[in-house]
Amino acid sequence: MNVIKLRLYVTGQTPSAARAVATLDDVLKEFEGRMEVEVIDVLEDPISALNDDVYATPTVFRISPEPVRRLFGDLSRKETIIDGLGLS
């Protein structure tokens, strides 16, 4: 079974960051056992954000399976994340 790997970039403890994390928690529950999520705060790890060309937060990447896909902006709807990252 292939594990879906996501990476979420946020900036600090902002309301949009909290919504994105909460929404990804809901997505993680739906794909229980088949998904891993890494959350990176660009204030703590700006080099990772630069390496992934992150210029806006929140941004979420589907790292695997390839091809890599990204979504940024309002990540407060589970359906937006699932559809936008091609998880359905």
Image (spheres, helix red, strand yellow):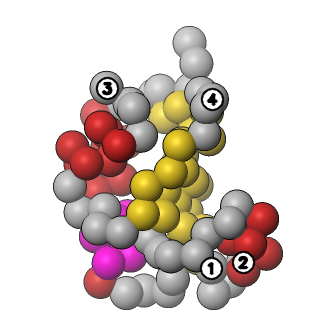
What residue is disc 4 on? 66
Do the numbered discs 1 and 2 sit on residues whose CB atoms are within 8 Å?
yes
Q: Which residue is mark 2?
A: 45
Disc 2 on helix, strand or loop?
A: loop
Mark seen at residue 27? none
Numbered disc 4: secondary structure:
loop
Q: Amino acid at mark 1?
A: Val
Residue 9 location (% of width, % of height) = 54, 68
Q: Which residue lies under the disc numbered 1?
A: 42
Position of residue 20 relative to residue 29, above or below, is: below
Q: Is residue 9 left or right of residue 47?
A: left
Query: Does residue 22 appear in the picture of this structure?
Result: no
Q: Which mark is residue 88?
A: 3
Amino acid at circle 3: Ser
- Disc with the residue nearer the chain's start (3 vs 2): 2
Q: Which residues are magenta?
A: 16-22
Within 10 Å of the Cα at label 4, are there few (<14), some (14-19), or many (20+) other Cα atoms?
A: few
Is the Cβ of the residue at disc 3 closer than 8 Å to that at disc 4? no
